[in-house]
Each structure stands twice: as C-alpha cells, then as structure tokens.
Image (tube, rainbow, N blue to C red):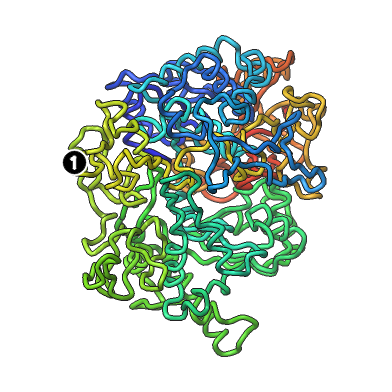
Amino acid sequence: MTNHWVDIKNADLILIMGGNAAEAHPCGFKWVTEAKAHRKAKLLVVDPRFTRSAAVSDFYAPLRAGTDIAFLGGVINYLLSYDKIHHEYVQNYTDFSFLVKEEFGFDDGIYTGYDPEKRKYNKSTWGYQIGADGFVITDPTLQNPRCVYQLMKAHYSRYSPEMVSSICGTPKDAFLKACELIAETATANKTMTIMYALGWTQHSQGTQMIRTGAMVQLLLGNIGMAGGGMNALRGHSNIQGLTDLGLLSNLLPGYMTLPGDAEQDYKTYIEKRAFKPLRPGQLSYWQNYGKFFVSTMKAWYGEAATVENNWSYDWLPKLDKGYDLLQVFENMHQGKVNGYICQGFNPLASAPCKIKVSGALSQLKYLVIIDPLATETSEFWQDYGEYNNVVPSKIQTEVFRLPSTCFAEEDGSLVNSGRWLQWHWKAAEPPGDAKGDQEIIAGVFLKLKEMYRKDGGVFPDPILNLTWNHRQPTSPSPEELAKEFSGMALKDLTDPKDPTKVLLKAGQQLNGFAELRDDGSTACGCWIFSGSWSEKGNLMARRDNSDPYGIGQTLNWAFAWPANRRILYNRASCDLSGKPFDSERTLIAWNKGAGQWMGADIPDFVATSPPEKGMGPFIMNPEGVARFFGVDKLEEGPFPEHYEPMESPLTANLLHPKNDKARANPAARVFQGDWATFGKPDEFPYVCTTYRLTEHFHFWTKHVRLNAVVQPEQFVEIGEELAKNKDITAGDHVRVKSNRGFIIAVAVVTKRLRSLNVDGKRVHTVGVPIHWGFTGVAKNGYIANTLTPFVGDANTQTPEFKSFLVNIEKV
C-alpha cells in the first residue's frame, strides 16, 4: 500500500477493482465516503459482481472474472491514444525514455527466451541497453523504436475497446465511460486512488494485474501523490506484518531474500542484491543491503555472527526452488513430508483443492496445530459425513493441538494495510490451557535446543547459537521482541565524518535504519521496522491524531514503516524544481532557505538532496525512476499481457487465438498430476468466483453464535438468466460441481450477477462465499476450496481462487 487508509479521503476518483472494500473492509471504507462527501469524489467499481461497493458507486462496469489485465490494458491504450497522461511526470520519473535491448521481443503472446518444456523464460534479453559508462542509454525525444514508451504503445495498441469488450464482456460504452473517468485524473490537480485486494492477487496472473494497475497510475502521475497510489487492502489484521517479517518461504525480514543453491558465496549473494545505480546521481537504496543483512544476522546470532564466518551466512538454508504453500502440499501429497507445524492457519479451508490437501495431510506422521480454535485442519481426520467424508482409521497422522491466545488476550503490535505498526494491549486472560504464541514457540525451541546440545545432530550450529536473551526464556515478552526488531547499537556508534563524536552508545535503541552498519556494530530484526521502538520509547503506542496540515498525515499516531513515512515515493508529488504539482495537497516541498525537503510527511528521499542534483524519486530502484518495463523481475514478461485463467470458458486467448501456449499464463507452474484435474468448458461451462461477506470473518466467526445467526446457511449466488435456464428458484438447494468436487448450498437468485456477452457467447458467473466449514457453532457447510484448482500466480504462487469453471444443477 503506497499510501494509507486515511489518505483515501484526498482522492478525486476512487477505483475499486480486484476487491470489494465496502464488504470486506467496512471500517476502512469510511474514507471513501469521506472523499465523496467532502471532495465530491467519484467512485468507480469494476467487478464481476454488483457488489456492496458498486451499490454506492457513481459508475459500475462489469467484467468477466480473470480478465482484469485486458480491461486495464485497454485503459493504457486509451490514455496513450488520446494523450491523457501526465507528461512532466512520465518524462522525468519513469523509464519512458530508456532503450530496451535489441534482442528483446514479443511474438504471438510469448516473449523471447521461452522454454515450453520447463514452462520458464530465460530472461537474459529482458533488460535495458547499457552504455560504456555502465548507465542505461536513453532517448529523451521518445522517438527511438526501442524506447520503453514506443514499445509499450505498440504492445497495448492491440487492446482496443472492441477487443476489451470481446474478452471481458464489458459493454463497450461502459468501458469507455470508465476510461473517461480515469483519464480526468491525468491533470496535476486531480488524483485517482486504486483500492484492490484478493480479487487481483488470487489469479494465475495476479501479480501482473497489480502491475497493470500501477502502470495506469504512473501514466496519470498518481503515484506518490496525496489521494493517489496503489492501495492493497490486506485482509487479516496482521497479514501485512506477516510479509514484512519475512514469513513467506523465500524471504528474510524486511523483504530481503534467502539465497539460492547457486549462491554459496556470501560476497556474490550481497553484490547481487546491493544494486548499483543505473543512471547518474541516483540513490539506489538497496545498495545498503549488506547493512540490513548483517544487522539481521546479529539480531539472530549475536556474538556468534562474525566477519570470519560471513555473519553466519552459511547457516542459512540455500533454496533449490521455492517452498511456497502449493509446493509444500505437493511434497506432502507425494509422501515427502513427515511433519507440519500449522500456526494460525487453516490450510484445509484456505488452500486449493480440498481433496488433495486432505490427502496430503493424511500422509503425515504428525501435525501440530497452534490456534485458539478447533479448525477444519485440526479436525481433518474426523468423519463429518458429506462435509468431510473420511475414514479416520485409515489416516495415520497424529494431531497435536496447542491452544493459543486470541489477539485480544495478548499485548503486541499489528501492522495494518497502511503499513502502520499499532500497539495493542491485553484485554482479557486466555481461557483454559491456552498460551501465547511466543510461549508455545519458546517451549518447542528450547526443547529442540536441549536435544541438540545433549544428543548432537547433523548440523546443530544454527540451533545452538541462536540468540535467546530474554528475561523469561520460556516466555519472551512482546516488548522484548519489539525492541529486537526495531534494533539497537551493539557498540558505540560514531559519526563517520568525526570519529570522536558518539552518536549512540552501546545498548541504546536505534532511531532508524539509516544508523545500521555492516561491521557488526548494530542488530536489527527487521530493518524496515527500525525506529519503531527508539530511545524515545514505544512509538507504535502513540495515539496523537493531530493533523496540522489537514490532509490526514497524522505522524504522531502509531508508527509507519519505513521511517514513519506515510506516503511512499512522495518526492514524485513535486516537479523537478521541488515545487508541488498540487499546492492544495502538498506532501513535501523543497525549502531552499532551510536546505531540505519539508512538509506534511517524512520525505521519501534524502532530505538534504537539492532538486538540481537530479536524484529520482523512486530511490529503491537503481534507475531512480519507476518502471513501465519490468525488466527481469516477473516470470511472465516485462509488460503485463492478458492470459486466460487456467480454467476458462474460452478455448483460446482472443489476443492469440492460434497459439495454445499463450492461452493461459505460460509461466504458471503446474504440477504434473494436476493437469488432469483442470475442467474443460464443455463439461463445466460456468465461471465461478469466491468472495467474502461482512457478516463473517474468514473461517473464524462461524465459531461465534451471533455471526452464525446473521448469515445462518451456506449459499451461492447465480444470475436470473442462468437460474431461468436451469429452472432454479431462489431458495432451492443446488449442487455446484468442478472437476475436483462439489458443494451443495442454497441458491440466491440475484440481479447482482449479470450474464456477459464474451466473444459472441453468453457467459454466466456463479458466486461462492468462502466462510463455511464443519467446525464451530454455525450450521455445517462445505469448504469452498473443494471446488478450486491447485495452481497459483507464477510469481507469488497465490492460488487461483477468483476464476475457475463449474457446472450447477438443482438438487
């Protein structure tokens, strides 16, 4: 989320696409209503369903689930064709003028370097032309056919309104109306914000959907602006913190990455990530990767991490491949996993293809569940009849349930969508034998450590040397952990320009990540959180909502990473001279008298770097500018391209009708045994999509009687035309079936799901809420992921829950 919840009130246009904020984020949605009430902002909703967000919108446009790139690609084509772009912004703050390698190409849906056997690309041609000086070659006139602007213009010229309508099913006039509304924000004094959620991430090309949205915002000059940005609405209260702290399988804290098998050499690992500037005078802040990494290892291993052992680098696992959720359950399915520790997670309901997940869990020797509730995963071995038809005596898995605390029964911090670390305080003692997560994990770790110390092992070093300096080793306090991830000085830190001047004494808390060193003198568990607990105290606990500039930048409320900055890339809100594009919504500006950037926000920039030095606002990129051309960072290609979902009602991609390799995402990983589980449109003719309800929270509130009363029985939504074709009346029980299984639920016949005309054929959509299961006090229901395919996004491996094929019949 480049901006934050409160900042949404500064928008002139809000585009909700790939999400349903009014339903899934009802508290945050109040800022949309603030923008409408006080700025006369317009709300545009693009979604397969006429959602609760659409119900209060100024304009709604339907589209077929999974075709968002086609829609947004058409928007890009419209903006470029009608010259509705922020010229000063794109010329100076993006890679528009950068020249791309001559070898790079795109032919009938496939980029250069594709290996169809491996379903992978060799990305060596996906890059910029580099001059003898080591910098990118540019053409400021934008006339060179190899410049990013010309390549992008040609790429999206195929996305005509007619093509968009044929692929998406969006009526042409509705698409053009949406384009007109979006194009109005290309001026310097208007901004659009994009609010998206799992409706974009849960696709086999979800990352590229989000990129396409970001490209639209860059063309309009809306990134880094008040009321602008790309705003990811995180679904769970702490899912932002989960990714921040590196709990994805390939990450270290602060979005650093684990090394691969080929990176046994520490120096090579660091140099590959410490990007050198690709244009003169640029910051390329990832040059400091070594400081972040060494400080993390010192937080983990203390005195055991030394320069002689490369700061314990050799103790880190080196990945031969990704071990994401789908890969782990594939390995489990093949009998290659003995045990699984499942903490605060319900994979039987949250992972795709329930029959495969249940079969995989049945292969384990042991399963450990750390959760406040009895989940479907903890009870997967029990026979619940039609809802979970298993034979317990044939399941070998031994299940250990370790009851943990609910968030209201513990102190600690949550990280919300806006990157705000907010401290919360215990409201109640946990019931029964429940213990806090840190106490449970400490118990497991200390027992393992004692076993390694006593009995030895193949590789005990990472376990025996792990720092565990807690007042109560069996129950580390949240305060101790928070101070650890914020960081401290291990030695006296002196001023590099004046070694006699001590900046921080050994043992003091750091003020921020700018103080991190790569010589072992600082420890920091998560560099982006650095400064959240400084010598000033716990800044996450601040509750001062004063807003001196009147645009929602409440800098003394909690702590936002990084550096308490509320809007990322805010240097891009000013022109080259440092003057704000919109004086009424000034975030920062260059103050010549003071010799620094000042304003309502913390500058996302070197505060004392004058505009004439030419440093670009996108300081994390080695180019200093934002990328339309994604170079080699994504698996499918540098420009987002529309591909059909893995299961599609169309047998071909209308953009590439003769190339079957370009029908669905050519880089999406599919395990060999799963190809046969994908359904075909002749047997499963209808598009299905999953979604959430305000009245239920994931699979949690079905344990709460009041929530169960408000939404008492599992249902599915179908449109009136499909209901008529199938002779289904509201209230009938229907069977929704995919190639992997079926669910039975009550039919809700609605106008909210309209039939669409896609390439001359009528396409119908079935909507399935996700919240039911066979545990809790709610009436039992079927797990929605009984239906979904075992495939994910090519970059993140997020499962494709938002578009797959089903059939439906009255029971």
Q: Which image quadrant is residue 136 in?
A: top right
Comparing 122 with 223, the one in front is 122
Q: Residue 232's spot in the image, x, y percent?
A: 46, 39
Comparing 322 with 87, the one in front is 87
Which residue sits at x=26%, y=55%?
541
- Answer above or below: position of 294 versus 328: below
Which residue sits at x=68%, y=14%?
757
Which residue sits at x=32%, y=62%?
515
Q: Which image quadrant is residue 145 in?
A: top right
Q: Is residue 782 visible?
A: no
Q: Which residue lies furthest to the front in this view?
A: 132
Q: Residue 79's spot in the image, x, y percent?
A: 51, 19
Residue holding disc 1? 546
Q: Which residue lies furthest to the bottom in this view?
A: 454
Q: Which image quadrant is residue 438 in?
A: bottom left
Inspect the image, locate mark 1, and give the three-letter code of the amino acid beneath it.
Ser
Q: Can residue 430 be seen in this view?
A: yes
- Answer above or below: position of 163 versus 322: above
Q: Which residue lies furthest to the top in this view?
A: 173
